[in-house]
Image (spheres, rainbow, N blue to C red):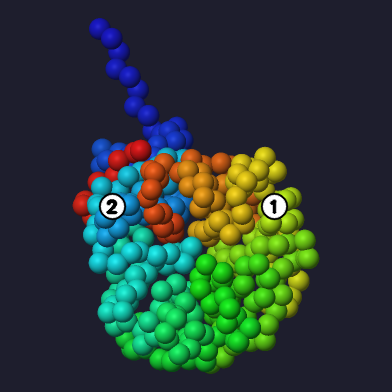
Amino acid sequence: MASEEAPIHGDILEAVFSHVPLVHLVPASHVSKSWKRAVSSSLTHVSPIKPWLIVLTHSPRASHVTTSHAYDPRSHVWLEIKSNTCHASPVRSSHSTLLFKLTPAEFAFTVDALHLRWHHAPSPRVWRTDPIVARVGTRIVVAGGACEFEADPLAVEVYDAVDREWSTCEPMPALLKGSTASAWLSVAVAGGLMHVTEKFSGVTYSFDPVGNAWTAAFDLRPDESVCYCVTGTLGERFMVAGVVGELRNVKGVKLWEVQRGLGSEMEEVAEMPMEMVRRLMGGSELGSVEVTWIGDFVYVRNTSLAGEFVVCEFVDRDRCEWRNLTNAAVSHGTRVVVCGGDVCMEDLLENRTFCMKQV
C-alpha cells in the first residue's frame, strides 16, 4: 500500500504561495485554516502585495464602452477584469490613481480604479475640454483646458468633496496662457500643493488650494540637457522624469528626486538603460511619451507605440530595477487610459462581479 504524501506546512508553503498570482490565492486561502494563515504570512513576509497598474480601453466604435485590465507586478501577470462598463462620457486619467469624467452637465472622479466607485458632482462653471485635474487632500483642483469661447483660459476651480461645493480660485499664471491644456502640462501633488510643469520648458508653478495662491515660477529641469520633463510622486517623494538630448536625438531618460520642495537640490536616482530608450522612442517625437506614477513604480509608455511599457521599480530608496512590459490590454484602434491603485485580498473577496481572468 502506497504511503500517504506528507502535507506541506510552514515556510515551504509560504514560499510556494509567494509564486502564486494574487487572484489564485483567494481560493487557496479557503482550503483550510493553516493554508489561510500561510497565505497571510506569505503576503506579509515573503512576497507582499504591490499596487496594480490599471488600463482602461475604449472601443473605437463605441467610446462609451470601457474594458478594464490590470497588471499585477507582484505576480508579473495581466488580468482581464470581467466587468465591461458603459460611461456617458470618456474616462480620463491624471497619470496616478485619479480618474475623472467631465462634461458640461457633470463632473465625476474616483481614486478606486479597480471598482470604479465614482463621486458625482455638478460640472464646473467653466466649460473645459482638456484641463489638468489633481486631488489635494479632500479638494479636486481643475485648471486650464477651457473651451475657446470661454473668457478666461487660465481659470481655476476647486471642488470640496466634503462640502460638495465649487469655488473659483486665483487663475493660472499668465506665462502658461499658451499651454493650459493637459497635453502640454504635467501635474503632481506633493507637500499639500499642486505642482504644474510645462513639459518642454520645465517652468513650474505650485498652487495652494487652501490659501488660494500660486508661487513664483521655478525651472524644474535638472540641467539644460533635459528637453522634456514630467513630474510625479513615489510615495512621499516628489520626482521628475526627464528626457535628455534633443527632440530627434534622445540620449537618455533619467529620474530625479526633488529633495525639499521647489528651489531645493535635485538628486539623480535612476537612468533608463539605453536599449530600452531606443525601443521606447521608436523614432517618434517626445510629445508622445507618457509617465504614470504608482506606489514605488514608474510606468513609461510611448502613446504612438501602445503595445509596450518600460517599468522602473524602486525596490528600496536607493535601488531600482528596469524592465520591459508588454501591454496585453491594447488592441488596434483602442483609446487607452492608464492609472493604478492599491489592492488587497478583500478587494477580490468582497465583489464577485469582478471575475478576473489571466490574459
Q: CA distance from mark 1 to mark 2?
A: 34 Å
- Where residue 138 sits: x, y (%)? 41, 80
Q: Is residue 75 left or right of residue 309?
A: left
Q: Quadrant of the N terminus?
A: top left
Amino acid type, residue under disc 1 in the picture: Arg
Residue closest to the far right:
224
Residue 45 visible, this angle: no
- Where residue 133 sits: x, y (%)? 46, 74
Q: Residue at x 51, y 53 (%)?
A: 303
- Where residue 341 sits: x, y (%)? 42, 59
Residue closest to the far front:
149
- Where residue 296 sits: x, y (%)? 55, 56
Quick one: SS at disc 1? loop
Look at mark 1 in the image and give the residue it sits on: 248
Q: Nearer the viewer, residue 61 or 240?
A: 61
Q: Residue at x 55, y 85 (%)?
A: 172
* Up/down of 142 relative to 152, above or below: above
Q: Label 2: few (<14), some or many (≥20) within 10 Å?
A: few
Q: Label 1: few (<14), some or many (≥20) within 10 Å?
A: few
Amino acid type, residue under disc 2 in the picture: Arg
Look at mark 2 in the image and give the residue it sits on: 61
Q: Is residue 353 left or right of residue 158?
A: left
Residue 100 visible, this angle: yes
